[in-house]
Image (tube, grey):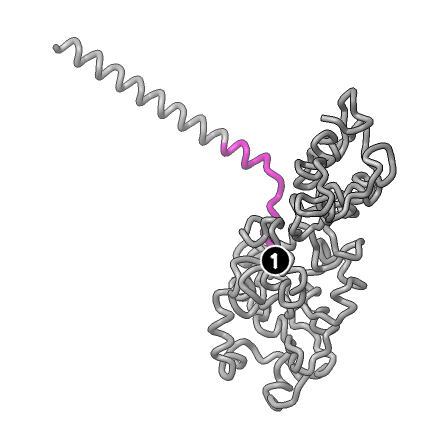
Amino acid sequence: MTTLRKRTALLLLGASFGLASLLAHAQQTRADLARNLPSSNLSGHDVQATRTSLLGAPGFAHARVVSNPAAPDATPVGEGMCISCHQLEADHFTHTLHALGLHAANKADASVPVCETCHGAGSAHSQSPQTRGLIIGFTKDSGTPIDVQTRTCLSCHEGGPRDHWTGSVHQRNDLSCSDCHNPMANFSSEGLMAKASINDTCAQCHKDIRVQFNRRSHMPLPEGQMSCADCHNPHGSVTSPLLKTNTVNETCYQCHAEKRGPFLFEHAPVRENCLNCHSPHGSNQNTLLVAPIPFLCQQCHTGQRHPNDLHTSQSLATGSNPDERIMGRGCLTCHANIHGSNAPSGPRFHE
């Protein structure tokens, strides 16, 4: 027993020496690295800027009082003056992303404004609160022109998805950022939308499109699996329907990559535009088709090869001249690879 204790003590002693050696080596390594690191630039006049960037929210660190053309001589009054009259608005604003970021930046650098970052200097407004336009407002009846409202938002949010805002259909129709966004309250889980979701916000104006999603075959937007912004960029695009890509087909291929090809045998209408056959938002036909098969196919193929007779509603099972080719899948019974084919029998898109 005594020998075992001695061996155990020797092992523990050796382990202690080994651990101490490892710690000493680690400390020496850190010291060597510290000597070889470049200058941190944390001295002199850069201290305040570094403190702001480290402690404040980086995206708000350079916020300044925005210029209001309607009150060019107004001076800042500070957040406290604003809250003395606008307590309810301040309560709603407290938990928003803008409030958290601006308050964090303001604590790191007192020169960063909070309310006046977006609303402009408040001295003229505080002296004459009933006069419209002395403070930048973001409602239709605020007295602030729409271009001033959007320019104020773009002073921070310019670029990226908003590169094509100027000249877009929304900009030409005098939409303001606040028509879709509400930075003063948390109505939505993301994007500070004016309604509970992106889809509800778009539906304020695009009611006709929203109704299409109630049709029998529709994109999974009502189920919450996608939103309008998955296909469209509401802030502007190079296309008239504000698509996020350059063409309709490129937009569809984001999800339907198997239809992209390239195929050895291609179907010309498919390559041209998916909307030749499909309705993008919703349809009462299968797979979002604009018309039932075979009527859809015969918009182009009437009188060619077979069938050489035009099918109408009279060819349906309840019509005066029922046709067996309409009883099943119609043309797709044989021509299944309608989007394109690499099969040896591909010229006719056979399965």
The quarter of the rendered structure image containing the N terminus is top left
Q: Is residue 228 left or right of residue 346?
A: left
Q: Residue at x 67, y 78 (%)?
A: 140
**What residue sits 22% from the left and 11% below the top?**
7
Classify mark 1: helix, strand or loop: helix
* Residue 119, horizontal then vertical, whole percent: 63, 75
Front-most of 97 and 311?
311
Residue at the (65%, 51%) spot, across then down: 284
Nearer to me, 311 or 109: 311
Does residue 283 appear anywhere in the picture? yes
Magenta extent = 30-49
Query: Which is the main secondary structure of the residues drawn in magenta?
Result: helix
Q: Is residue 310 magenta?
A: no
261 w.r.t. 149: above or below: above
What residue is pinned by disc 1? Answer: 59
Quadrant (top left/top right/bottom left/bottom right) for the C terminus: top right
Q: Nearer the viewer, residue 156 or 303?
A: 303
Q: Position of residue 331 (x, y in %)?
A: 74, 35
Find residue 315 and report its image quarter: top right
Location of residue 68 in the rendering, given as x and y in whole percent from the top left corner: 70, 78
State yes or no: residue 41 in magenta. yes
In the displayed orientation, state which residue is furthest to the front: 320
Q: Amino acid at mark 1?
A: Gly
Counting the numbered discs, the total is 1
Q: Is residue 153 above or below residue 276?
A: below
Inspect this view and state whether residue 248 appears.
Answer: no
Other residues around mark 1 within 10 Å, as few (<14) / some (14–19) / many (≥20): few
Left or right, residue 269 beside residue 29: right
Q: Is residue 41 above or below residue 89?
A: above
Q: Is residue 88 left or right of residue 70?
A: left
Q: Residue at x 68, y 72 (%)?
A: 66
Residue situated furthest left in the rendering: 1
